[in-house]
Every structure is written in C-alpha cells, then in structure tokens.
Image (cartoon, grey):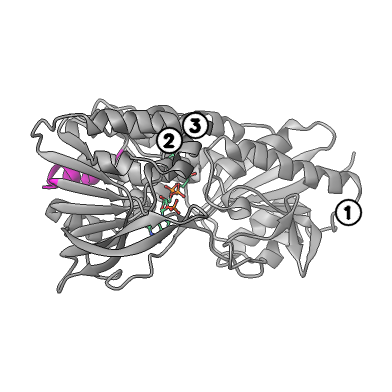
Amino acid sequence: MPRPLRVAVVGSGPSGLYAADALASQEALPLEVDVIERLPVPFGLVRYGVAPDHLSIRSVRDTLDKVLDRPGVRFVGNVRVGTDITVTDLHGCFDAVVWTYGASGDRRLGIPGEDLAGSVAATDFVAWYCGHPDADRTLFEDLVPKATGVVVVGIGNVAVDVTRVLAKTVPELDHTDMPQHVLDALGRSQVTDIHVLGRRGPAQATFTTKELRELGELAEADILVDPADLVLDPASQSIVDSDKAVARNLEVMRGWADRVPEGRPRRIHLRFFARPVELRGTEGVQAVVVERTRLTVDGGAEGTGELHEIAANVVVRSVGYRGTALDEVPFDSQRSVIPHVDGRVQRDGAAVPGEYVAGWIKRGPTGIIGTNKKDATATVASLLEDAAAGLLPEPASPDSADFDALLARRGVEVVTTAGWRRIDAAERARGAARGRDRTTIHAAADLLSEARP
Ligand code: NAP
C-alpha cells in the first residue's frame, strides 16, 4: 500500500475548503489534506467578510464545515506560515502545497488626508463588525458612536454592506452573530447621513441588484438618488441594453429617484460621478472634497475640476481588497497575486510541480463565493495531474506525525478539528443564551481557551 499523498492547503476560506473537498473527493490516490489556518477558526471571509445580516450567504459555512469531517482532512488552526513554520518546512512535510490565503489587505486612495483619524479601510471596519480577532476594538468602539456624517468611497458590494450595517437599527441586526460589543457600539451611533460615492456611473457600478435593493428597505433610512446621475450616455446605455443585471440595478435606482423622502432619521445618498480628492480636518476628518467626474472613451473616469465639500467625520474607503506577499512565495506586486499557470505556481517564469494556488490570491479579489469552487477544483486538477505523472518532489518527512511534532517543537498551540468543534459549540451556547443561533467569540485568547478539551 503506497503512503498517502500529503497536501497542505494554506487558508481555510472558501477556496481552501473547496480545494480540500476536491482533493478528498478523488478516489485515484490515498490522500491526506491538512488545512492550515493562521486563526483558531476556519472559514476566512465567510466568517469575517460576509455581512452578519446576510444569513443565507453565511450559511455556506455549514457546507464548508462538512469538508472538515471528510476522511483524510484535518483542520490545523492557529498556525502562521512565515512565523510558526516556514515555506521550506511545508515542502519538507508535504508533497504539495496549495496557497489559498486570500487577499486580506486593503487598497489605498492615494489622496491627501487619507490617514487622518476617522478615515478607515472597509476591510478593517468589516473585520470589526464580524468579530475578527485582529480587529481594532478601541478604534471602532470610539469612532462608531461619534459618527454623524459618513462618506463611503466605492460602489461595490462591500460598500453596500458597510452602508447597510451603518444605516440599520439594532433591532435589524440583533438576530445576527455579531459580538455584543459591536451591537452596543452600533446602537450608540448617531449617524444621520451616509454618502456613497461612485467615481463612475450607475451602469459601471459593481454592486449586485439583491444587495442594492436592500438599501431601500431599511427601517430608519431614506435613500436618495439624483435623477440626473441616472441619465445615461450612449456607452452606458449599451451596457444596460446588453446586461440584464445592470438593467435591473438601473430600474431599482430609478424607483428610488422618484421617491419622496419620508423624513427618516438616517439618509443614504447614493452618488455617482463623484470621486474624493482630499480629506480635510485638523484633529480628524471633518470634510471630504469631492470632484465631479465624467466617463472617458475607454470607460474610465476623469475629473472635471468641479469641486464641492461633503461634511463627514468618518470616511470608509471601500475600494477593494488586496493580496499580500508571503516570504519565500513568488508574488506579482503589480496585480497583488501569486503568478501561476493553470493553478501551478510560477517560479522564475516556470510552473513548479508541488506548489499551487487558488482563490483570491490566484485571481484577485473578485467573484462570489461559488466562483472559488470552480477555481479551486481547476487547481486541484493540475495538482492531481502532476501527482499522476510522478512530478511531485519527494518530501523529507512525509508523515503527519512528523509535521505535528515539528509544530509541537515550535511551541504552537494547534487548534484541531475537534478544537474548532468545541469553539463552535461555545458560540452556539452564547447565542442561545440571547435567543440567537450564535454569537461570535472575537478574542483570540477566548477562542483558544474554548478550543481546549
Ligand atoms: P469591487 O466590487 O471591486 O468594488 C470596488 C469599488 O471601489 C468600485 O466601485 C471601484 O470603482 C471603486 N474604486 C476603486 N479604486 C477607487 C479609487 N481610487 N477611488 C474611488 N473609487 C475606487 O470590490 P468590493 O466591493 O471590495 O468586493 C470584492 C468582491 O467581493 C466582489 O467580487 C464582490 O461582489 C464580492 N462581495 C460580494 C458580496 C455579496 O455577494 N453579497 C458581498 C461583499 C463582497 P471602479 O469600478 O470605478 O474601479
């Protein structure tokens, strides 16, 4: 009987768990998959990115969780590649490594005042309201209750999530798994106006209709759209004519432009052809200088020189996630991804058998959760092809006990699948005590303590 092929999947978000699932589903080879995760808990952006009030999308975690019970698959949590173990260590213990660690950084605006107090990255705000262990609680628990005017830069789905969470009342969020301190801070919010800025037009927005529509269904918020922003130039009209999703978005927004505001305590101003050029303030942000834009022939945006100010004491920059480099792993810093050919990592221009990539760190931060399934399955097909062809380099210590012993020698407190199950049970119990399905435990120390037998 040949020894099992050992595969390390680094990252336990959707792409990592879909990769583990695809590996566990094949029957040609005996196989062991260690899903290595730097946090004590699995699911990546399904836990720490999908908005907590989007319960149906978050329920994907039930499907992903089942992967951890598949024969041969282990969760190896609380292990940081680059700190606890090196890439060389991984190649010494596994036949193949699959990088699926996503894109956790944020993109910058590159404008004056961007670093003033009150200017935050959406990635950090989302991490806070989802209860990420690394979130800066002090920052957001101070900022959110003081917020009155907010500018959200960007018109993708993350911008829509952030806007909705800020505009909702606590009763609209109370059923979610948000940590109590997040609900308490949001409950003290004094937000009156949220300005959502798109540098291009409504036909170029990247939000989806279902998410957009929710902004018009909030208990305490009016939505305002300037009908003039919805007048389309021929190029935008042809996008609407050829793309049903964009046409639906326009229909929703035209319905809002016709609405008479009902005088609710909060207002969402959805604004197009508007880009921030400067954040102004002394102690912190007080105003955002916005330039009117117009579309260019190639569909981009250019400034018109027409400026105005929006009063705001919080700015949320929601202009996209960005992949980050890992020591010893090739990185394309232009595109912020790991270079690859068919999922095989490229080193010095050549694809290397034994090293693979899937998900956002392979293709950039785009697509819905399901996109990662196809992507991860394609990468795994390349891996299995290389295994069948005998191309995978032989590791020095291809035994799970050797890997476990290495982690123990480094003093790493590994959270296993059983440890994660204990955290899961503790979160469900905390939620049940408040009439919810679950309440997220946010502090790493508390997660580790719940993981212990
Ligand atoms: P995104 O869809 O790429 O949106 C980024 C936004 O930032 C765009 O409006 C972009 O405008 C704008 N932007 C970029 N640079 C800018 C700049 N310098 N100044 C002003 N605006 C700028 O990214 P995302 O919202 O972070 O979402 C990431 C992915 O996750 C997407 O695929 C999204 O659909 C997905 N997601 C899905 C859900 C859901 O299904 N419910 C929820 C959250 C996220 P331009 O288009 O002009 O570049």
Residue drawn at (76%, 48%) of the image: 6
Q: CA distance from mark 3 to mark 2?
A: 16 Å
- Label 3 sits on residue: 241
Q: Is mark 2 within 8 Å of ligand 1?
A: yes
- Dividing the picture into quarters, in which one does residue 207 lie? top left
Could you say where residue 269 lies in the image, as x and y percent from the top left? 22, 44
Mark 3 and mark 2 lie on one chain; the one further toward the N terminus is 2
Earlier-in-chain disc, 3 versus 1:
3
Closer-to-camera residue (135/409): 135
Question: Do tag 2 and tag 1 residues touch (Cβ < 8 Å)?
Answer: no
Amino acid type of the residue tagged 3 in the rendering: Asp
**Pointer 2 residue:** 208
Residue in view at x 59 percent, y 54 percent: 361
* Above or below, 327 relative to 80: below
Residue 180 is covered by the magenta coloring: yes
- List x then y, in percent, for residue 307: 23, 64
Q: Answer left or right for 140 relative to 350.
A: left
Counting from the top left corner in percent of width and height, residue 213 is at 33, 30
Query: Which residue type carries mark 2?
Result: Thr
Depth check, mark 3 against mark 1: the one in front is 3
Q: Which residues are magenta?
A: 178-192
**Local crowd at mark 2 within 10 Å, few (<14), some, or many (≥20)?**
some
**Any part of residue 453 in sight:** no
| Earlier-in-chain disc, 2 versus 1 | 2
Whole-number angstrom distance, CA of label 2 to CA of label 1? 43 Å
The residue singled out by tag 1 in the image is 391
Vertical comparison of 288 with 64: above or below: below
